[in-house]
Amino acid sequence: MHRGDQRRRTFTESSTHARIDQIAHTAPDPPRNCVVLRNGGCRIPEDVAVVGFDDIALSDIVYPPLTTIRLPRHELAEVFFKALDAFRNDSHAAGSQYFVRTSLVIRESTGPVRQHK
């Protein structure tokens, strides 16, 4: 269902659970999941919020634009090769923790928490 589509399926709590169950049994794909939820009558973000990870290029062109966690790929690659180099130099050394900065990119697929009556 697109923005201008006048067809509207009935939203119920059970239909949401059915769609979420369907999504849980498929590969994580937030843009596709938005389509599945909308086709099931769910409104995003009014009925359910969707958040992606990695801020792929598709995130800001799907409907609704997807809130996501941005992971800087260049920094991730640097950390990966640093860890690989450390392992290559001493494969018996204790493991290390590496950190990569992430940031939350808020778009239209999330909103304020709705108060239940």
Image (spheres, rainbow, N blue to C red):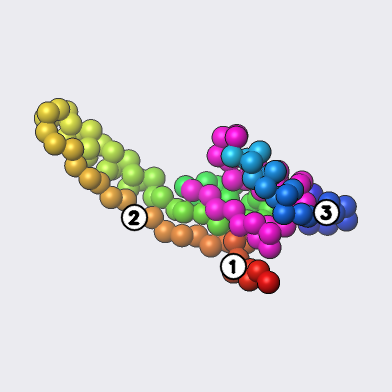
First of labels 3, 1 by sequence position: 3
Q: Is residue 91 above or below residue 33?
A: above
> In which quarter of the view is residue 85 placed?
top left
**What is the x, y in percent for residue 9?**
83, 51
Asked whether 25 or 43 is in front, the reply is 25
- Cα separation, mark 3 vs mark 2, equals 41 Å
Relative to 90, is 77 on the left or the right?
A: right
User: Label 3 belongs to which residue?
Assistant: 10
User: Which amino acid type is marked by label 1?
Assistant: Val
Characterize the local packing of mark 3: few (<14), some (14-19) or many (20 or more) Cα atoms within 10 angstroms: few
User: Label 1 belongs to which residue?
Assistant: 113
**What is the x, y in percent for residue 98?**
25, 46
Q: Residue at x 72, y 57 (%)?
A: 43
Q: Residue at x 11, y 33 (%)?
A: 93
Q: Which residues are magenta?
A: 25-53
User: Which amino acid type is marked by label 2?
Assistant: Arg
Q: Which mark is residue 101?
A: 2
> In which quarter of the view is residue 44 placed?
bottom right
Nearer to us of marks 2 and 1 is: 1
CB contact under 8 Å: marks 3 and 1: no
Q: Is residue 106 above or below residue 74?
A: below
Residue 96 colored magenta?
Answer: no
Q: Residue at x 77, y 46 (%)?
A: 39
Secondary element under disc 2, as helix, strand or loop, is loop
**What is the x, y in percent for residue 99?**
28, 50
